[in-house]
Image (cartoon, grey):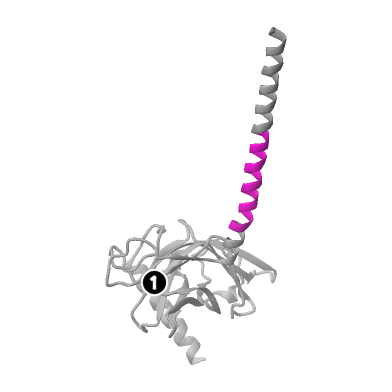
Amino acid sequence: MISNITAIFLLIVSGCFISSSYSLSPPSNYTWPQDSKKLCFAAEFDLVLNVDYLKSNGAKASAKIPLNGSTYESYRVSCSTPATVHELTVSMLNGFTNILLSFSVDAKNMTSLKKIYGYITFNDKQTYFPDYAPALEDVHLFSSNVSLFETDRGNSYRCDTKTTVTGFNTTSNVTVTSVELENLRVQAFADDTKEFSNYGVEKVCPADADKNSNLIPIIVGACLAVLVVVVLVAYLIGRRRNRNGYQSV
């Protein structure tokens, strides 16, 4: 019980600190430090938070909350403590909802996303949870351990295909059913001793690789079909010219 209270307190304090420090338009890249050419972290992605909750009449409702200009509040990244963990914190809904993406690097210098967690606040300032049950007016924690986007340190990871994260530990009346990540490019644990000019060599997720491999035979087939049509048209034109030549003789 004490640990839960402490976690809630720390998350709220973190959210308040972020909100008071930065108020930005949604960035195209989540880079850190901001306004610096020497980065420890860089990422870009689309995100959707899906939440089920209880309404005042006892019925269940669902909220789909995209990270966009109307929901985004601010972000920050922790790159220093501990040295093996980089955490991106995205604040949403006027700072009352925080989502943290925790990346780790192991002894083999492999980086990956290891945890998604945060909190949702139900209060009268929210528009995504209409007619929620009064008993829900509080801070609700959520957490899910994952193992995603693994690549060598110094490289980046790309996955345009939607990745849906589930399995969140939440209360029965407020459930984070999933977090969706799409059009993702991330490089945690970048070398911040030199200028960051671009993402490192990218590792592509299997879903994207499958899409690309399926496109190759389609493109080849289309090119062959066009070639057949061109050859057929050229043959017909040549045959017609030859026939006209015979008639003139």
Residue at point 39%, 63% (across, down): 199
Residue at point 30%, 72% (across, down): 192
| Main secondary structure type of the part rendered in magenta | helix
Q: Is residue 218 magenta?
A: yes
**Could you tell whether 236 is left or right of 203 in the image?**
right
Which residue, as the protein is rendered here, is positioned at the far bottom? 2
Which residue, as the protein is rendered here, is positioned at the far front? 249
Q: Which residues are magenta?
A: 212-229
Vertically, is 59 above or below 46?
Answer: below
Query: Toward the viewer: 191 or 40?
Result: 191
Q: Residues within 10 Å of mark 1 (few under 14, many from 20)?
A: some
Q: Position of residue 176 (x, y in %)?
A: 59, 73
Say what amino acid the circle numbered 1 marks. Gly
Q: Position of residue 205 (x, y in %)?
A: 55, 66
Q: Quarter-wise, where is residue 180 in the image?
A: bottom right
Query: Toward the viewer: 151 or 27?
Result: 151
Query: Toward the viewer: 19 or 180?
Result: 180
**Could you tell whether 35 is left or right of 70 in the image?**
left
User: Does the image show residue 194?
Assistant: yes
Vertically, is 129 above or below 70?
Answer: below
Residue at point 35%, 83% (across, down): 81
Which residue, as the protein is rendered here, is positioned at the far top? 248
Q: Quarter-wise, where is residue 78 in the image?
A: bottom left
User: Does the image show residue 130?
Assistant: no
Q: Position of residue 173 (x, y in %)?
A: 63, 76
Q: Name the residue that disc number 1 marks.
A: 154
